[in-house]
Every structure is written in structure tokens, then in C-alpha cells.
Image (spheres, helix red, strand yellow):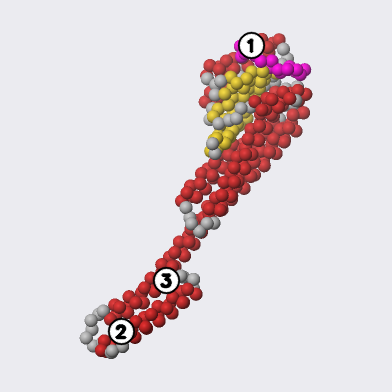
Amino acid sequence: MIVNCAAYPKAGGSPRRFELAQVGELLRDTDDFFWVGVHQPSEAILDELQAEFDLHDLAVEDAHHAHQRPKIEVYGSSLFLALHTSQLVQGSIQFGETLIFLGERYLITIRHGASLPYAPARARCEREPEMLALGPSYALYAVLDLIVDNYMPLVGEFERELVALEQDIFNKTFKQETIHRLYSLKQQLVKLRLAVAPLQDILNQLVRFHPTLVRDEVRPYFRDVFDHAVRVNEATDTMREMLTAALSVNLALATVQQGEIVKRLAGWAGLLGVPTLVASWYGMNFVHMPELAGRSSYGVVIGVTATVVLALYVALKRAKWL
């Protein structure tokens, strides 16, 4: 459950790995800052983290229960962040959660559910020791940047799915599966927006406030992540509007096609109505019907009926009812 524990010297240099039980001693004897990564920890691990880093009870309680809304909270000289993460798993988009504790000398990341490891963010920081010397706030930037960057493939996947759905919508055959896919895509877009929209407020606070925890040199980097989050949020809003329009267009096209079918049925019913009327007229068995005595009456009735049907067919064809 403990993915990594590393201590980074303030003056730079190679990181040192440590055990949680050593934190109290290292905090007292060194000026390092500590980065602890945890994945779906047990209550015992969280209690140990709380004891070693003096984390606030309410923040640890949120970490115990997870399933928090995206937020940033101030607890004394530390920050607690709850963020929603996303991951594309076998063509299906799944959402997870990351809880972050930021102090003057530590950064703790706790992952729950669908979330990619933060090893790339850690490796990036270790490749830039001059930036890592800025402390935990730069490490927090690397983590947030990775979280937001992981949203971008989802946006691309949503766009490709939307294009495919638009092609299905404008086909002449309407499938119930298309409606299900439209609803599912809109549901996932709503979840993505609920994850990204609050992140903008979190990043805005990191850009403007908390001077004891966020170095001024790091604030431009948070602004860059904020810009990426805005782009993801705008793309999400645009696709949600397009999906709403697609649902309306699909309904309108289905209604139009249904109307065309009804018109064709009405046209053929009209054509069948002419011989039905004639046959019912002569099937009334009246005694005094002068046409019955004529030698050519049968042929005349058939000809007149065929002529009326043909004229009606031409009229309906021109009116595009057939």
C-alpha cells in the first residue's frame, strides 16, 4: 500500500528512501522534505501517517472514507486536497480519487480507485533537482500537472466517440443502441466536468494564496496547469452541448422518418381504397343496375378503376407520398 517514501535534501542531491517510522527522527535531524506515495491504504497506515506528520483529524477522516468532492481545505499550516482522477481501462473510462496532504516539509499522495501511478511525476522532479529544491509545492505541481494531462486522452476519446455517433445519427436507419451510447457518453462527460470544474478553483487558490506553502517561483507553473484545466473544461462543455444537440437531432430525424412512413402507408391505402370502393359498390346486389346487363360493362369498370388508380398514383408520386 505504501508505494514510495523518499526524502529530498534541501540543497539538492540524490533522494533517500526511508520507512515511516523514521519520519520523526528525520524531521528533527535534517532539513529534507518528504514525499510519501500511498495506494488504497489501510486504516493502520493512515493512523501512522497522521502520527508521524501530525495531520489534522478531519483531513484524515476524509482520507479514511474517500469519495470526497474535489476541494481544498486549510488545516493550520497544511493543506488538504481532494481530487478526482480518470483512467481509460480497456476502452472504458473509469474515475478514481487522489487525496493530497501538503505541508512545509512534506507531500503525501493517497490514491483510490482508477488512477495512474505518480511515478512519472516523481521521476520528472528528480530529473530537475534545481526545481525540486523549491520544495513540496513543486512536487505538488508535478502531481497536479499529471492529473490534468491524464484528462486529455479522455477528451480525445470522447471526441472520436461523438464523431462516430454523429455518423450513426445521420444514417437512414435509426438504432436504439445509438440512443444508449449518446446517454452513456453524456453521463461520462458530466462526471468528467464534475472532476475538472472544481479543480480550477483549487488551482486558482494555489496561484494566489498560501504563501507559506507555495513558493512564488512555483506559482507560474500552477497557472499553466490552471490553463490546461480550463481547456479541458471548455472542451467538455462544448461536447455536452453537442451531445444535447445530437439527441435533439436524432429525435427530430426519427420523427421525420416516422412521418414519411405514415405518408407512404396513407398513399398506398388511398390506392387500395379505389378498387375497394368500386368492388363494394357493385357488391351490394341491387336488382336494377343497368351496367350489369351490358356486354362490355366488366371491362369498362376495370378500365375506369385502373385509370383512377393510375391517376391517383401519379398525383401521390408528384407529392412525394410514394
Give the residue displayed 51% in from the left and 44% down from the top: 184
Q: Residues within 10 Å of mark 1 (few under 14, many from 20)?
A: few
Residue 274 visible in the snapshot: yes
Question: Which of label 2 and label 3 is nearer to you?
Answer: 2
Question: Mark 2 is on which residue type?
Answer: Tyr
Q: Is residue 9 magenta?
A: yes
Give the residue displayed 55% in from the left and 31% down from the top: 114
The kind of secondary structure element at disc 3 is: helix
In the rendered image, which quarter contains the N terminus?
Answer: top right
x and y, in percent, of residue 67 in the image: 53, 30
Q: Residues within 10 Å of mark 3 (few under 14, many from 20)?
A: many
Question: Mark 3 is on which residue type?
Answer: Gly
Q: Is residue 25 magenta?
A: no
Is residue 264 positioned above or below 215 on the image? below
Residue 58 visible in the snapshot: no
**Marks 2 and 3 in Cβ contact (< 8 Å):** no
Question: Which of label 1 and label 3 is nearer to you?
Answer: 3
Would you name the residue on which mark 3 appears?
267
Question: Position of 307 compared to 289: left or right?
Answer: right
- Give the alpha-carbon distance from disc 1 to disc 2, as whole Å: 111 Å
Question: Which of label 1 and label 2 is nearer to you?
Answer: 2
x and y, in percent, of residue 207 in the image: 72, 32
x and y, in percent, of residue 242 in the image: 59, 50
Between residue 123 and residue 22, name the one nearer to us: 123
Question: Position of 176 compared to 199: left or right?
Answer: left
Would you name the residue on which mark 2 appears?
298
Q: Earlier in the sequence, mark 1 or mark 3?
A: 1
Would you name the residue on which mark 1 appears?
22
The kind of secondary structure element at disc 1 is: helix
x and y, in percent, of residue 14 in the image: 73, 17
Q: Which span is picked out in magenta? A: 7-24
